[in-house]
């Protein structure tokens, strides 16, 4: 007898079969992720300097604004990365 988990997994596999990636696709996705990490690190370095400068001059609101902008940039970059990874997965 199958467990309810096994039955649920079978139904899920029928609805959305697992996607197997070619070696080229795996390399391309890894490259995209590497570039994403580099962009985030670059932005964090730039923001940390701005935050330190703002906090040193007592401008807490300015530092918070930079932190919020950094969070927005990360979210946008993550969305862009996911879109590009989805495009790579669609290639055949």
Image (tube, rainbow, N blue to C red):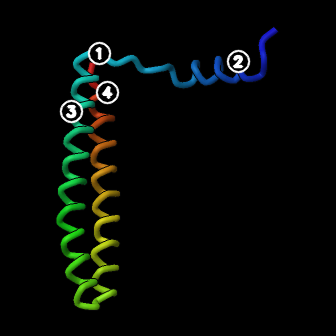
Circle nearer the N terminus (1, 3)? 1
Residue 90: which disc?
A: 4
Which image quadrant for residue 23? top left
Q: What residue is rendered at 33% in x and 35% in y?
A: 86
Q: What residue is rendered at 69% in x and 23% in y?
A: 8
**Foreground pick, 23 / 92:** 23
In this picture, is 52 found above or below 76? Answer: below
Pinpoint residue 61: horizontal percent, then vertical percent: 33, 87
Pinpoint residue 25: horizontal percent, then vertical percent: 26, 22
Q: Quadrant of the N terminus?
A: top right
Q: Residue furthest top?
A: 1
Foreground mark, 1 or 3, reads: 3
Q: Please tell me whether mark 1 sits on a helix, a strand or a loop.
A: loop
Estimate the spatial distance between the alpha carbons at disc 4 and disc 2, rounded to whole Å: 28 Å
For mark 2, what is the residue? 6
Residue 31: which disc?
A: 3
Q: Residue furthest right?
A: 1
Estimate the spatial distance between the alpha carbons at disc 3 and disc 2, rounded to whole Å: 35 Å
Mark 2 surroundings within 10 Å by alpha-carbon count, few (fewer than 14), some (14 through 19), many (20 or more): few
Q: Quadrant of the C terminus?
A: top left
Circle nearer the N terminus (2, 1)? 2
Circle nearer the N terminus (4, 1)? 1
Q: Residue furthest bottom?
A: 58
Residue 22: which disc?
A: 1
Pinpoint residue 39: horizontal percent, then vertical percent: 19, 51
Foreground mark, 3 or 2, reads: 3
Q: What residue is rendered at 24% in x and 77% in y?
A: 52
Mark 1 surroundings within 10 Å by alpha-carbon count, few (fewer than 14), some (14 through 19), many (20 or more): few
Pinpoint residue 80: horizontal percent, then vertical percent: 28, 48
Mark 3 surroundings within 10 Å by alpha-carbon count, few (fewer than 14), some (14 through 19), many (20 or more): few
Estimate the spatial distance between the alpha carbons at disc 3 and disc 4, rounded to whole Å: 17 Å
Which image quadrant for residue 11? top right
């Amino acid at each position: 007898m199958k467990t309810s988990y096994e039955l649920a997994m079978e139904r899920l596999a029928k609805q959305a079969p697992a996607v197997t990636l070619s070696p080229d696709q795996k390399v391309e996705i890894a490259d995209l992720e590497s570039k994403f990490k580099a962009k985030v690190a670059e932005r964090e370095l730039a923001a940390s300097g701005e935050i330190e400068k703002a906090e040193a001059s007592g401008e807490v609101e300015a530092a918070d604004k930079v932190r919020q902008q950094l969070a927005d940039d990360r979210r946008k970059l993550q969305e862009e990365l996911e879109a590009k990874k989805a495009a790579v997965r669609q290639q055949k």
